[in-house]
Image (cartoon, helix red, strand yellow):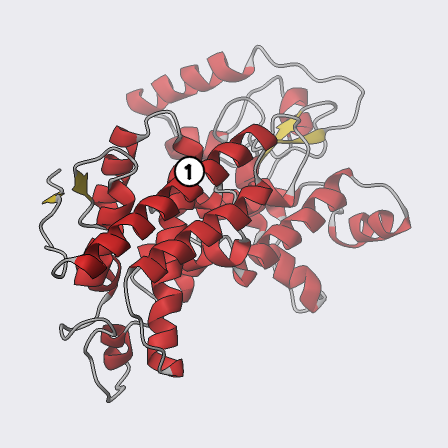
Amino acid sequence: MVKWTRITKPKNRGGLGIKDLRRMNISLLCKWWWKTENGSGIWHDIIRRKYLKKGMVSLLKKSPKNSPVWNDMLKVRNVYTRGRSMIVGDGKSTSFWHDRWCGLVSLADKFPGLYEISDEQDCSVEYMKKKNWRPSFRRWLHEDLQNQLRRLYDTIYCFSTNNSNDRAKWDWEKSGVFSVKSTYNYLSRHDVGLSFKKIWKAKIPLKIRIFMWLVSQNAILTRDNLTKHKWKGNTSCAFCTEKEDGHHLFFGCLTAKYVWSLLAYPLGSDCRPGSLDQYWIWVNNIMPQGHSMHAVGLAAVCWAIWRTRNAVCFDNKKIKSPTEIVCMICSFLTYWAGLLKEDLKNQVSLGAEAIKTAALFFHKQDLKSQPQEENQLVPFAA
């Protein structure tokens, strides 16, 4: 019911945080590039002698003689080089034009006009240092290219080489050391969406958190969603005669309104929320200090309504009063309170008991008098 591209988004961008295999594969291949440049051992020596004869990763090209694994690594080299810069030692392993060694971008990207007419596009920093930083070009430079050349001199004259080996630095980590996580985050940088941080940080079972994420995506198997997948059946709500969808089931149905009204009374509110978005405003107004419990309360209400709805649909259970749903909500709150700290646990347990007491009181009043009026509490208006 939810697109795979949305599921693989990070949790802080509206997804479930399930890893995208293609992005993860690219990240792991980049790790092999890092090991090739910075690792030590027999395997690294063999790879360097076979493929890195010139010592510069940026100049490698595909060849039929290469192994399939090496050619696959070459496909993701551009991702690797975006996150890696070079700290120059002797300059032998650093490409003068292609690697980032004297700024945030390579000299080829910073001075594209000079690079296009350079006679030494594949030279190393060591080679250019021996020429006293004097690149040669195929033709005479006009005024604009002369200005670029002066800026190039200003950029590179402050650098010097030494006898140590060049080494790579990973710019996407503060430590400068490569990580698969930073590469994966870079590949996911264009993913956008709401974070649902309140749901993911709520002290409730993981199953309930995923359920609430599905509710927020309008992806639970309500009758309207089943109809979209060519399901043929009764589309009426399990509690009334109107058509069932996510909003109606949890907020618009008379049963849901009665449940929210019973919850609003002991909380000291004279109104109830009319939608998921309104709930966050409503609960923040009546419980400004209880941010950690906002998502827990919403989850208890939605899960109780959903469980009751399924019992009616699949077990033919008859619900005598919405008070049964409120009692179930209180049971969930009491049970989930075991996941909280001791002081908050006691507060939640007392609050659940107060809600249950109020619900049973009104239930007795309803039995004595005519059916409750639906407009006992005014509708919520944001």
Question: Residue lying farthest bottom?
Answer: 232
Q: Secondary structure at mark 1?
A: helix
Residue 169: x percent and y percent? 65, 30
Please state if 105 lies on the left or on the right of 326 as rendered.
Answer: right
Please state if 189 lies on the left or on the right of 24 as rendered.
Answer: left
Find disc 1 in the rendering and name its residue.
351
Local crowd at mark 1 within 10 Å, few (<14), some, or many (≥20)? some
Question: Is 185 located above or below residue 21 in the figure?
Answer: above
Residue 52: x percent and y percent? 74, 47
Question: Toward which corner of the image does residue 220 lie, by quadrant?
Answer: bottom left
Q: Nearer the viewer, residue 206 or 370?
A: 370
Question: Toward which corner of the image does residue 38 lie, by quadrant?
Answer: top right
Q: Is residue 138 visible?
A: no
Q: Nearer the viewer, residue 242 or 220?
A: 242
Which residue is located at x 24 percent, y 89 percent?
A: 232
Question: Is 207 located above or below residue 78 in the figure?
Answer: below
Which residue is located at x 59 percent, y 33 percent?
A: 341
How many marks overall?
A: 1
Residue 77: x percent and y percent? 58, 50
Name the image quarter holding the C terminus.
Answer: top left
Please state if 12 lies on the left or on the right of 280 as rendered.
Answer: right
Q: Is residue 171 visible?
A: yes
Residue 179: x percent and y percent? 65, 40
Please state if 92 lies on the left or on the right of 79 as rendered.
Answer: right
Which residue is located at x 38 percent, y 82 percent?
A: 314
Q: Nearer the viewer, residue 147 or 345?
A: 345
Question: Residue lying farthest right?
Answer: 42
Label 1 is placed on what type of residue?
Answer: Gly
Q: Nearer the viewer, residue 43 or 246?
A: 246
Name the image quarter holding the N terminus.
Answer: bottom left
Which residue is located at x 48 percent, y 42 percent?
A: 202
